[in-house]
Amino acid sequence: MAQRPLLEVHDLVARYALPGVPSFGGLVTQRRWLQAVDGVSFTLARGEAVGLVGESGCGKSTLVSLLARLADPVSGRIVFDGIELADQPAAQAAKAPWRHRVQMVFQDPHDSLDPRRTAFDAIADPLRSLRGLRGDALRQRVLDVAQRVQLGADLLQRRPHELSGGQAARVGIARALAPEPELLILDEPTAALDVSVQAGVLALLDRLRRELGLAIVFVSHDLGVVRLLCERVLVMREGRIVDQGPARELLDRPRHAYTAALAVAIPRFPERANS
Ligand SMILES: Nc1ncnc2c1ncn2[C@@H]1O[C@H](COP(=O)(O)OP(=O)(O)O)[C@@H](O)[C@H]1O
Ligand SMILES: [Mg+2]
């Protein structure tokens, strides 16, 4: 029997209000909308990593903020392990029983972490609120997760500005992993990092997903990174999925003109051009 997908997305639509345009001599202001996500559907299997790629402004962040239920779609369905996630407004998602199962890692770790909270607190907070852990059990779990992301225990009392970019990124990942999600959504998690630091964080993510059997939606404008980390790719343009398929096939021998244009930008070493 075929297994049910972990995540099913049906015809999602999201839009932003644009500044109104006065018409009829200023008597009426006509509302205008930007359809940032324009009818997106896809499925994700348990433990599968899918890359979401496309140029800046195509709607990637908007789409994943819907999936993580941080924003509300206008219409469409998000079905996670049989649960309808879009039935409730995003404002209620923080307290939903499934909240710990779907977690998000944000682009800029320094920006997304509370500057007043230590690394320990950043990791402990979701364990308190979503898993009800306290005392020794909480402490132990924070230490375990820190070790998993290769974050030295000596760094846990630091605040974000006392951490390097790579260390802060590991805190952001640990915070998302702490409540034991089955689906991890990452929105350009290494875009703000130096290339060498980025490589370390990507290797970590790759190992974690294998060890923990995580399903991943990985947003990136860098197709080389997606090719390393993901089995499958969704190509997004102007709010729609315009191409999708196995990562290597799609990026190495693109058939869709838009994917080909994106793929040209993947840096490769000349001696490995045919590998
Ligand atoms: N809060 C917002 N208000 C109005 N428009 C927005 C807002 N956030 C994003 N947009 C617009 O929606 C479109 C998609 O943006 P985004 O989802 O951030 O794309 P990406 O992550 O692919 O760069 C863009 O045209 C962007 O300018
Ligand atoms: Mg974005």
Image (spheres, grey):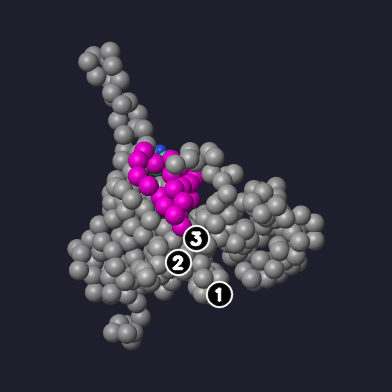
Residue 239 inside the magenta-drawn segment: no
Q: CA distance from mark 3 to mark 1?
A: 14 Å
Nearest the viewer among 180 and 158 is: 180
Name the side, left or right, on which 180 lies relative to 73.
right
Residue on which the image places disc 3: 183
Q: Confirm or reject: label 3 Cβ below 8 Å from ligand 2.
A: no
Q: Is residue 266 left or right of residue 169?
A: left
Question: Can you give x and y, in whole percent of width and height, for residue 114 in the image?
Answer: 64, 48
Q: Is residue 62 above or below residue 8?
A: above
Rendering coords of residue 254 (x, y %): 23, 70
At x 26% / y 61%, what residue is drawn? 243
Q: What secondary structure is marked by label 2?
A: loop
Crowd tier of the residue under label 2, counting other residues whose Cα lies within 10 Å: few below 14, some 14–19, many 20 or above: some
- In the image, taking residue 136 as reference, residue 275 lies left or right, namely left
**Nearest to the observer: residue 178 or residue 2:** 2
- The residue located at (54%, 40%) in the rendering is 92
Q: Are marks 1 and 2 in contact (CB under 8 Å)?
A: no
**Image quarter hosting the N terminus:** bottom left
Q: What residue is rendered at 50% in x and 60% in y? A: 184
Residue pointed to by mark 2 = 46
Dot 1 corresponds to which residue? 211
Q: Quadrant of residue 137?
A: bottom right
Mark 2 within 8 Å of ligand 1, using the beta carbon: no
Residue type, label 3: Leu
Rendered location of residue 241, percent (x, y): 28, 55
Percent across and percent down for residue 115 are 66, 48
Provide the residue span drawn in magenta.
Answer: 67-86
Q: Between 251 and 83, which is closer to the camera in this rendering?
A: 83
Label of residue 38 in the image:
none
Q: CA distance from mark 1 to mark 2?
A: 13 Å
Residue 165 in view? no
